Image: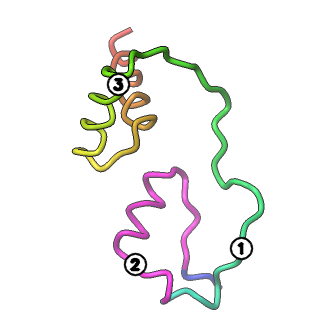
C-alpha cells in the first residue's frame, strides 16, 4: 500500500512535499508522462512590462508563481459576486 496520499489539489500536494522528502518514497515514485492536474481553460491577461514585473515581485514575495498569484486574485474577486 502506498504511503503517498492521493492529492485533491496542487496546494495539498505542495504542502505534503514541503514536509516530506521524495527520497523517503523513492520505491513508490514513477516518472509521469502526462500532467497530474490540468486546468480546464486559460485566459490571457495583457499587461505592460512594468506591470508584469510588479506582479512577479509580489508573487515571489508570497512564494508563488505569477500565474498562481493572478488566479488567487481572480478567485478572491469571484467570492464577492
Give whichever of 67, 40 is nearer the camera. 67
| Label 2 sits on residue | 20
Q: Residue at x 36, y 26 (%)?
A: 52
| Label 3 sits on residue | 73
- Asked which secondary structure carries label 3, the reply is helix
Q: Is residue 57 left or right of residue 14?
A: left
Say above or below: 56 vs 8: above
Number of residues whose C-alpha sits closer than 10 Å to that of mark 2, classed few (under 14), some (14–19) or many (20 or more): few
Q: Residue at x 25, y 45 (%)?
A: 62
Separation of disc 1 and disc 3 at Cα? 33 Å
Say above or below: 20 vs 35: below
Q: Is residue 61 left or right of residue 47?
A: left
| Label 1 sits on residue | 31
The quarter of the displayed image where residue 65 is located: top left
- Asked which secondary structure carries label 2, the reply is loop
Where's residue 59, x and y in %?
A: 30, 39
What's drawn in magenta, residue-wise?
Answer: 4-23
Number of residues whose C-alpha sits closer than 10 Å to that of mark 3, classed few (under 14), some (14–19) or many (20 or more): few
Which of the marked residues, 1 or 3, is nearer the chain's N terminus? 1
Where's residue 38, x and y in %?
A: 66, 43
Work out which quarter of the rendered image holds the N terminus and state it: bottom right
Q: Residue at x 64, y 91 (%)?
A: 27
Amino acid at each position: 500500500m502506498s504511503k503517498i496520499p492521493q492529492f485533491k489539489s496542487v496546494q495539498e500536494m505542495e504542502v505534503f512535499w514541503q514536509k516530506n522528502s521524495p527520497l523517503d518514497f523513492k520505491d513508490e515514485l514513477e516518472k509521469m508522462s502526462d500532467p497530474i492536474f490540468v486546468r480546464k481553460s486559460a485566459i490571457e491577461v495583457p499587461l505592460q512590462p512594468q506591470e508584469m514585473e510588479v506582479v512577479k515581485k509580489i508573487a515571489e514575495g508570497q512564494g508563488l508563481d505569477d500565474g498562481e498569484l493572478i488566479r488567487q486574485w481572480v478567485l478572491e474577486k469571484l467570492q464577492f459576486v
